[in-house]
Image (tube, rainbow, N blue to C red):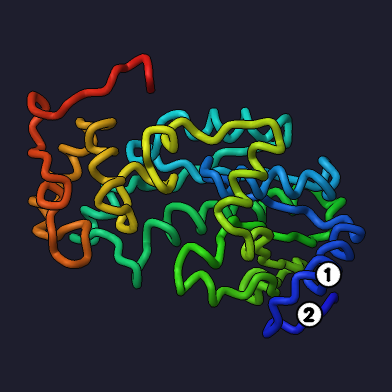
Amino acid sequence: MTQIDQRTNDHTNILDVIHRLRDRNALFVINHSGGKDSQAMTAFLRKFVPVDQILVIHAHLPEVVWEDAWDHVRATSNGLHSIKVEASKTFFEMATRRGMWPSPKYRQCTSDLKRGPIEKAIRTHLRNNPQYGGLVVNCMGLRAEESPRRSKAIPLKINERNSKAGREWWDWLPIHDWTVNQVWNGISQAGQNPHWVYAEGLSRFSCIFCIFSTETDQQISARLRPELYRRFVLKEKELKHTMNMQGRGMEEITGIPALPDVIARPDASAI
């Protein structure tokens, strides 16, 4: 098994390991949300990983993600083999059962609705495609610039939990050291455009309303998706638990009452 000192972030050392894994016919799995980082990462990997060694996986969360996210993933993957996975429960069902929203410390929305279904799909794909020999490089578009927590992430490491039953599983952050300008440039150089929500002013692409959304992002999302905004506000009141970890309700954060007749609706042709 290829080894690497997981304490180092040396880019050259990491790429040397990645090239050796590629040459061993590893399956490279791209976790693609539809956002700018996933899109730039996909364009980057296409430069040196053979097409038949790439699998694009999109974890779709019905009701709470931008409806055309999957269409954008497929359109910008340029024919790469792509699959969409969904959890057995929805985001609202999860929150209702728990009696609270996810939190930065306990992110069930990520573990249960995204990571779990994605890992299951990868294991199934490896079983059905023995040509990869159980060797997989799981690629995620997390960047150090995004947060102090992500800056401490190890860019390349063996996933011990999933490296069993004949599998050798690596987790890799291909654009961990990229700046946001490098991301935009990567998309532009690929001859592509990012998802339309960025042009509306959103700073990040994830669920339409997210515990990590800025106040500005929540305001924009509330105006773009008023019906969903109202549903979130009503669920906050039902659970007696706010999406914001500081205890501020969405109506307080956005300044927008959750009433359909007072929310300015966008031009449908622009969505």
Please, what is the three-letter code of the amino acid marked with disc 1? Val
Q: Identify the residue at horizontal 35%, vertical 72% (top origin).
A: 105
Label 2, on which residue? 4
Q: Is residue 186 above or below residue 247?
A: above
Quadrant of the image for the N terminus? bottom right
Classify mark 1: residues with Cα within 10 Å, few (<14), some (14-19) or many (20+). Answer: some
Q: Farthest residue in the top direction?
A: 269
Residue type highlighted by circle 2: Ile
Relative to residue 132, is residue 250 drawn left or right? left
The percent coordinates of residue 20 (x first, y second) are: 89, 65
Question: Mark 2 and 1 residues: CB-CB less than 8 Å, in contact?
Answer: yes
Tell whether 144 sits left or right of 236.
right
Q: Residue at x 53, y 40 (%)?
A: 34
Q: Judging from the image, what secondary structure is the residue with disc 1 in? A: helix
Write down the quadrant of residue 56 in the picture: top right
Q: Residue beneath label 1, please? A: 17
Image quarter where the C terminus lies is: top left
First in sequence: mark 2 vs mark 1: 2
Identify which residue, 14 or 71, lies in the foreground: 14
Residue located 25% across and 55% down the image: 95
Q: How far from the left and from the top, in percent, is residue 52?
A: 83, 42
Q: Residues within 10 Å of mark 2 (few under 14, many from 20)?
A: some
**In the figure, is residue 52 to the left or right of 88?**
right
